[in-house]
């Protein structure tokens, strides 16, 4: 029996069957705990409360302790080592901001002591104990990413996680749609200017969540679709035969969340999702016939027109209202940058943005806008923790991005790497001028998808099939031998 390249990389059916039978009870329990966390994290209002951060940290810790590490590659181990360095950097900054006297005490402590007529120990953070409490979030992120990287090489488990995320997005989106249509306070406890907000309350986070689900579906369907296009087979064949039912369900789920996306009224969520989807399709297309390219482009335009016509009315109205939410952010960014310049090394205290930022507000920002979150995760991180901590985090993110891109090049048919790359990209761009990655409920989903892609990036390079082309003999022309195109097999993965 011929063994396919995918079977060589992930294990043949017999090998996968032996692996499933050989998995211990604790390993299976660790995976199901991880899956439960990923599915349920959005439900308690995006898990922004400290209680839910603690609950999901416990879930993630149990998963990390129970899952098996026998298949961890050297490259994955090095990434996990880098993650420990990031955690250590957070812990060091939190410690320096919590000790008294701190290395760079803030003047507010001495001034407060003078007003109250008592001696107050000087700290390097704006709020006592806030930096240590804040450590729960980077710890949660590290644990989720660790579990996802370890789970990623198992194709079956990666598939279960991604499809569960899409299924949960459909369920939560449907509940949000019912609340949106009937204006139900019980299903939509926070009405943000008439937008669909699912369980995340904020329209922008809801949009990037639904957009991520749509991109996961695209990543699952794109590789077989491109194979069919290159072989001049009808795309309708994807939804029949082996795997056809699963692809049909995935396609309907993706179309559903795509229709819901404009109802969130999020400009950035809609635009980033569509740009990422179009970019993924264009980058994967290597068609020789212009007619095929035109067919694909026409299909994309028809689909977008359908979505735009069904649910884009309210979104179109919002485009005419640039509004304070954009102009105010630019003013706030300037204030944050000025504050960072005053304390570049240690910042104003992890987790204390809401208490620290008001002192830098000017009249330009007005009195209506509430900035308890920085509306830019990179700027807020630098504001709270200082430039050195931000550079450590940015370097680790850049490393993960490089590994994902390399993985997508080495394994172009792997849908889970593509999903991790697309979701990672739109989440990173969106959080640069908003705050979805500061919402623990979405952060868990985001890092789960990215971690799965990272874990699979260290699998062996895909071997491309030998493609033989026949050169037809023209009348009067000399005969030509069959040409072969082949990519030489690469060495083992790092």
Image (cartoon, rainbow, N blue to C red):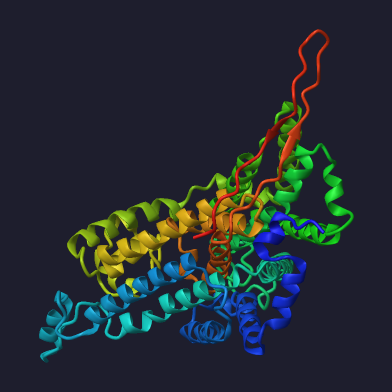
Tell me what residue is drawn at x 29 percent, y 69 percent: 385
Whether 316 is drawn above or below 340: the answer is above
Q: Can you tell which quarter of the image residue 370 is in?
A: bottom left
Q: Work out whether residue 360 or residue 290 is closer to the camera in this orientation and state it.
A: 290
Give how far across and how far down residue 386 sits, in percent. Answer: 26, 66
- For this orientation, the residue located farthest to the bottom is 118
Q: Work out whether residue 311 or residue 257 is closer to the camera in this orientation and state it.
A: 257
Q: Quadrant of the N terminus?
A: bottom right
Give how far across and how far down residue 16 sits, in percent. Answer: 72, 71
Q: Work out whether residue 33 or residue 108 is closer to the camera in this orientation and state it.
A: 33
Give how far across and how far down residue 171 sits, in percent. Answer: 73, 70
Tell me what residue is drawn at x 51 percent, y 52 percent: 406
- For this orientation, the residue located farthest to the top is 476
Left or right of 492? Residue 356 is: left
Tell me what residue is drawn at x 62 percent, y 89 percent: 26
Give how far across and how far down residue 120 sits, in percent. Answer: 15, 88
- Is residue 372 something that shows in the picture? no
- Is residue 25 something that shows in the picture? yes
Q: Work out whether residue 192 or residue 149 is closer to the camera in this orientation and state it.
A: 149
Left or right of 287? Residue 238 is: right
Q: Can you tell which quarter of the image residue 83 is in?
A: bottom left
Whether 303 is drawn above or below 402: the answer is above
- For this orientation, the residue located farthest to the right is 241
Tell me what residue is drawn at x 26 percent, y 62 percent: 387
How many numbered tags mark residues here?
Answer: 0
């Amino acid at each position: 029996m011929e063994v396919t390249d995918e079977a060589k990389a992930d294990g043949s059916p017999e090998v996968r069957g032996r692996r499933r039978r050989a998995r211990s009870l604790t390993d299976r329990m660790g995976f199901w705990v991880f899956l439960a966390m990923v599915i349920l994290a959005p439900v308690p209002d995006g898990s922004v409360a400290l209680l839910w951060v603690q609950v999901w940290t416990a879930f993630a810790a149990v998963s990390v302790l129970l899952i098996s590490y026998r298949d961890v590659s050297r490259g994955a181990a090095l990434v996990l080592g880098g993650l420990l360095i990031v955690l250590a950097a957070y812990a060091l900054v939190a410690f320096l901001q919590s000790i008294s006297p701190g290395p760079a005490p803030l003047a507010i402590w001495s001034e407060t002591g003078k007003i109250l007529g008592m001696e107050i120990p000087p700290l390097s953070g704006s709020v006592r104990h806030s930096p240590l409490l804040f450590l729960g979030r980077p710890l949660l992120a590290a644990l989720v990413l660790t579990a996802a990287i370890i789970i990623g090489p198992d194709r079956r488990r990666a598939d279960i996680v991604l499809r569960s995320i899409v299924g949960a997005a459909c369920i939560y989106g449907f509940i949000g749609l019912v609340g949106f249509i009937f204006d139900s306070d019980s299903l939509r406890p926070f009405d943000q200017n008439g937008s669909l907000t699912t369980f995340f309350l904020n329209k922008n986070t809801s949009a990037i969540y639904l957009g991520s689900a749509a991109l996961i579906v695209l990543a699952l369907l794109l590789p077989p679709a491109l194979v069919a296009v290159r072989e001049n087979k009808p795309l309708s064949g994807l939804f029949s035969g082996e795997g056809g039912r699963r692809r049909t369900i995935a396609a309907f789920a993706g179309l559903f969340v795509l229709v819901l996306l404009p109802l969130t009224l999020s400009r950035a969520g809609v635009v980033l999702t569509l740009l990422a989807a179009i970019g993924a399709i264009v980058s994967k297309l290597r068609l020789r016939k212009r007619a095929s390219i035109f067919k694909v482009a026409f299909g994309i335009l028809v689909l977008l027109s359908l979505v735009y016509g069904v649910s884009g009315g309210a979104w179109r109205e919002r485009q005419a209202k640039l509004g304070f939410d954009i102009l105010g952010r630019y003013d706030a960014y300037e204030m944050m940058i000025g504050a960072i310049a005053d304390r570049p090394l240690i910042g104003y205290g992890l987790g204390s943005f809401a208490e620290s930022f008001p002192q830098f507000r000017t009249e330009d920002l007005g009195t209506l806008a509430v900035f308890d979150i920085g509306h830019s995760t990179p700027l807020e991180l630098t504001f709270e923790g200082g430039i050195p901590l931000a550079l450590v985090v940015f370097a680790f993110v850049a490393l993960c991005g490089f590994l994902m891109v390399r993985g997508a090049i080495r394994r172009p048919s792997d849908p889970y790497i593509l999903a991790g790359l697309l979701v990672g990209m739109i989440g990173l761009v969106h959080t640069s001028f908003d705050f979805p990655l500061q919402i623990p409920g979405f952060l868990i989903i985001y890092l789960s998808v990215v971690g799965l892609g990272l874990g699979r990036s260290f699998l062996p390079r895909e071997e491309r099939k030998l493609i033989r082309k026949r050169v037809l003999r023209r009348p009067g022309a000399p005969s030509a031998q069959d040409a072969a195109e082949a990519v030489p097999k690469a060495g083992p993965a790092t």
